[in-house]
Amino acid sequence: MSSIIIRCPICSKKNRVSTDKIGLTIKCGSCGAIILEKGTKLCKLCNEIVYYGINLSNGEMVHKSCLESIQIQEKSIRNDIDIKIKKLYELEKELKNRVKKRQSIGFKIISIFIKQDIDIEQIQKSIKIIEKDIQKLQTNLNILKKKLEPIYDYLLTYPPDWRYRKDAVIARDGKYCHKCGKKFIRTAQLHLHHIIPLSKGGNNKISNLQLLCEKCHLSEHGRKKFNNEFNSKETAFSKRVANIEYAIKDGKRIKFGYKKPSDDKFIQRIVHPVALVKVKHNMDDGFTLCVQGYCELRKAERTFAIKRMKNLKII
């Protein structure tokens, strides 16, 4: 079991805390002072405590700086690969031309009298070096992608690797609309669609994605015109989570309409939020992002699924 070291702000004693205890109220083993508040989380990338960061739909968080750092590295490596591939293409083209020239009768006659500085072996050596460089860069890129994938799976917005996720779904299902069954030649004619919407607690995992043609996609979204390209804008769900996080940090209350599966209508709740938590589903292995806090209506601590809220306001 992994652990982290936390120094007590009162007595300065170092405390080793198991990572599975993060989220609970932790006291110093020496003086008894609280060193971790309930609801504290660890960044999924650096495994350090995160107070402000990017919330994920499974209840976890990452430092914005950690995510951006990896994204910058990924972009840099992709650019390096593109440059290497372009150089490789130029060398292969040059090699082909030089081999063709060397095989010509004119070259063979001239080479008897004049030494030509055409070094095919050097070009071949350069090609091998670049191919190894590309392979090494691709390995490093795959390492970064493995770090980013589980973060992008639970982003509250569309992930930056949306196009690659579409490629993965096409490889799994073919170029067919999941709803009408029509086959398409051009992949641009197919839209990537969340089976369970992000606003209802869905995620960006491949298992929650399917292909729909434009007509079927419009039908799924109540004829709302949809852009098939990646969009990094915040969703209504992500804004809701950000507002709850702000209310928690600033000790404010939140007001919202809430409707449980058994309710006929939305009931207004005023809650003193304490923490964002993930709650395991009863029917499957999934999780729902929820907020815990004191409910003024019920006069008790309650847990509310964010996907069941509407018209959330900070008061």
Image (tube, rainbow, N blue to C red):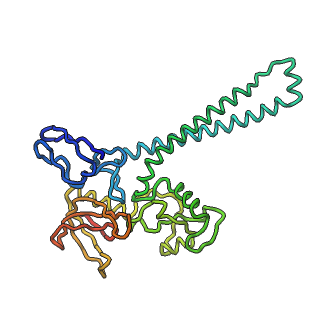
Residue 249 shows up from this direction: no
Q: Residue at x 58, y 69 (%)?
A: 177
Q: Residue at x 27, y 66 (%)?
A: 313
Q: Nearer the viewer, residue 280 or 192?
A: 280
Residue 238, x across and y down, in percent: 36, 60
Residue 146 shows up from this direction: yes
Left or right placement of residue 248 versus residue 306 in this view: left
Q: Nearer the viewer, residue 185 or 247?
A: 185
Which of the 4 image quarters holds residue 269?
A: bottom left
What count of labels does the image hold?
A: 0
Residue 232, x across and y down, in percent: 45, 56
Which of the 4 image quarters holds residue 298?
A: bottom left
Residue 108, x across and y down, in percent: 87, 25
Left or right placement of residue 144 versus residue 179 in this view: left
In the picture as drawn, the residue positioned furthest to the left comes out as 31
Relative height, residue 82 to residue 296 (above, below): above
Q: Residue at x 19, y 58 (%)?
A: 251
Left or right placement of residue 285 versus residue 111 in this view: left
Relative height, residue 9 to residue 246 (above, below): above
Residue 112, x across and y down, in percent: 87, 19
